[in-house]
Image: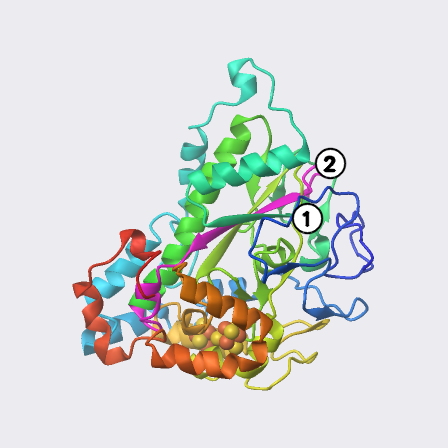
Amino acid sequence: MTAVSAVDTSSTTSYHDPGAISEGFVYRDQSKRYPWWVKSVDRITVETNASEIQKPTINMIMMSLMRRGQNPDQPRQRDGLVNKISNGTPGFSLPDVSLEFASQTFFQSGVNVDGGLISGFRKIREVISDQVHTPQELGVPPWRGTEEEASSMIEKAAVHLGAAQVGFTAMDLTWLGPNVRISSDVEKPTTSREGIFFPPAYKYVIVVAGRVPMWAAKCAPGALGSAADRAGYEEAHMAEEKLMNFIRGIGYGAFDIHMMGINPIPFAVMAGLGEMGRMNRVVSPFFGGAVRFALILTDLPLALDKPIDFGLHEFCRHCRKCARACPVNAISFETDPSWEPLGPYSFKGKKVWFEDCEKCAAYTSSAGTYCSACLAACTWNKQNKTALHGLMRSLGAKLPAFSRFYALMDDLFGYGLIPEEKRKTWWEKDLPVKGVSESSKD
Ligand code: SF4
Ligand code: SF4
């Protein structure tokens, strides 16, 4: 497979092979990263068509979600919530809803109940970034080492600071809107009315993964399920903020580009944190769909990771558990993925199981909470590392055609979503710390 130049300095961009690893970078040894049944590969497992690929003008899904609060034609999230609390809908008790808000205390500060932006987040960030003391302030030289040493150090620091996993990849404008450019006129990543500008030295992306607490996630769709979804983002972003401070503390720049509106999914796939599943979201070989991502752009030279292949494509062809879990049929039941986008928020040039984002966003608006039932239902969601799950994972990767059987077994052994009427019992459970267990059935 041909390697490609990832940092495209042209503003209009003629496309290289989208999804292939990049030339001009060092790659770290991938052999110890995953168990034997996860292969490291030189291009992502999604087929792409360079001449067709369509760039999102903005992060459309994020913007559609944010617009919910301001669009009079869309149901207000607040109304959906209030109705459900008042009607005693299972999974929407006042404590359930309050837990959802509390789960995103940090990550969503600055976003109101209807999804509209209010001030706040930037102020918090200014305060916490004061916590770090740069080498310049201390009067010592910045850290120096090889790319491999840098990646190893960042991985250790990230896990210490709360990340479930990290991956390293190159900044690649292929996945971003035409308003995102590389520019020598800026010293740090900058957002203005004209667009988003990255200096050429900022070509390394760190993808930070946060785990979703499965006991609550299994209560999706509903406020408890949403509390789990939000807690996953909170974990990723808390670890990310601390890791950015660490990077500044060794003398390099670090910026959160997820909060600039950049979609983490292609970067997570390029960094080998998962493959694209039927639900058109990332599925991790370790955490299934129970993982959320944050993105750091840095000028610290890093050794990159490669994409992975654990047989998910074939597995998803037969499994369909996420599609069955979707309350509005937004996920494809077709056996094979397609080149045809579905609705205005999906983009041409890749062969995936497109989901109907409009249906998904409308459901979220009317429900009053984030849904994430597809992610919570995924057959690959197993937080514990018992031998049995290790065996099933390796069989799933190597004999993916049996996925229908695995999905059935998953349901039989009670790994699916918790039915609505039983969700009250969540408050009676003896929960592991942060709801994430290494040993119990989840
Ligand atoms: S998050 Fe969207 S696509 Fe997934 S199950 Fe819910 S409504 Fe369906
Ligand atoms: S639930 Fe099954 S079909 Fe859906 S993404 Fe997970 S493995 Fe693939």
Please tell me whether residue 2 is drawn above or below residue 256 in the rendered image: below
Quarter of the view holding residue 327: bottom left
Q: Nearer the viewer, residue 325 or 314?
A: 314
- The quarter holding residue 421 reads bottom left
Residue drawn at x 40%, y 51% as measured from the top left: 234
Relative depth, front residue between 311 and 376: 311
Where does label 1 land, which residue? 171
Q: Determine which residue is flagged by label 2.
A: 185
Q: Is residue 326 visible?
A: no
Q: Residue at x 72, y 68 (%)?
A: 54
State the image coordinates of residue 201 (x, y, percent, origin top left). 71, 36
Q: Which residues are magenta?
A: 198-223
From the viewer's perspective, is 266 left or right of 407?
right
Q: Amino acid at mark 2?
A: Asp
Coordinates of residue 76 in the picture (x, y in percent): 37, 71
Left or right of 229 in this view: 317? right
Which one is in front, 322 or 74? 322
Helix, strand or loop status at disc 1: loop
Against 343, residue 93 (above or below) is above
Decide which of 82, 272 is in the foreground and name it.
272
Q: Tell me where residue 348 appears, x and y as whole percent.
A: 70, 73
Mark before the other along the chain sequence, 2 or 1: 1
Q: x, y (%) of residue 439? A: 33, 58
